[in-house]
Image (cartoon, rainbow, N blue to C red):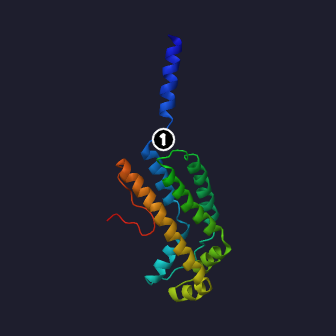
Amino acid sequence: MKSNFILCFLLVLLSSCGYSPEDYYNSAISAGNQVYVLRNFENRLERLEKGLQLGPEDLVLTTPTHVRMMEENVTKLQGKLGNEDSDAMITSAIAYMEFAIETAKNPKTLAAFEAAGNAPDLDAASVALEPYGDYLDSVFDKREAVFVTYDKAVSDFAKKHGIEMKFYGPGASSK
């Protein structure tokens, strides 16, 4: 009798240790939401485009913290691999984060962040960022490609499991 109780207890415990589809989905969405290293840069440029006069902003200062958080999340996501149903989504979330980590660690990115952070207006930002134009174009093109793959995997998974999709990513809105 005692061994049956222990066996039932272990079965209940093991069955509660798995992740639900929502858990996998939320992990992937959380990963996508953490890819904001470039968003701070873009937000500054958007404020300058609106004609705001801005004081210096150290866009480089917070980058190591963002990178560390993303690296920790990549490790957590890797721990969720092994489920055939969710692996494509989790793998795409990892790829999206790894792209952001690689970009944030690149000295050219950091130099562009510094240049934009020191620009008081749009004209000064344009001049300061001119040497990084081709590099930044390639970064944003690659980000778009990685994001499209991530978005498709997350959307497909959500639809398959009847999960209400959340808004995330570049240009996300609640419309």
- Does residue 102 sit above or below 154 in this rendering? below
The residue where tag 1 is placed is: 19
Residue with the most extreme left position: 175
The residue sitting at 44% across, 42% down in the picture is 20
Image spot of residue 62 (x, y percent): 61, 65
- Quick one: label 1, few (<14), some, or many (20+) residues within 10 Å? few
Image spot of residue 70 (x, y percent): 59, 58
Residue with the most extreme front position: 84
Image spot of residue 129 (x, y percent): 59, 84
Taking 42 as reference, is 134 left or right? right
Q: Quadrant of the C terminus?
A: bottom left
The residue sitting at 52% across, 89% down in the picture is 123
Secondary structure category for the residue under label 1: loop
- Does residue 96 sit above or below 122 in this rendering? above
Taking 33 as reference, is 66 left or right? right
User: As rendered, which of 53 and 76 lies closer to the eye?
Assistant: 76
Q: Which of the 4 quarters of the picture holds residue 100? A: bottom right
Image spot of residue 23 (x, y percent): 46, 45
Residue 39, visible in the rendered structure: no
Q: Amino acid at mark 1?
A: Tyr
The residue sitting at 59% across, 56% down in the picture is 69
- Does residue 158 sit above or below 167 in this rendering? above
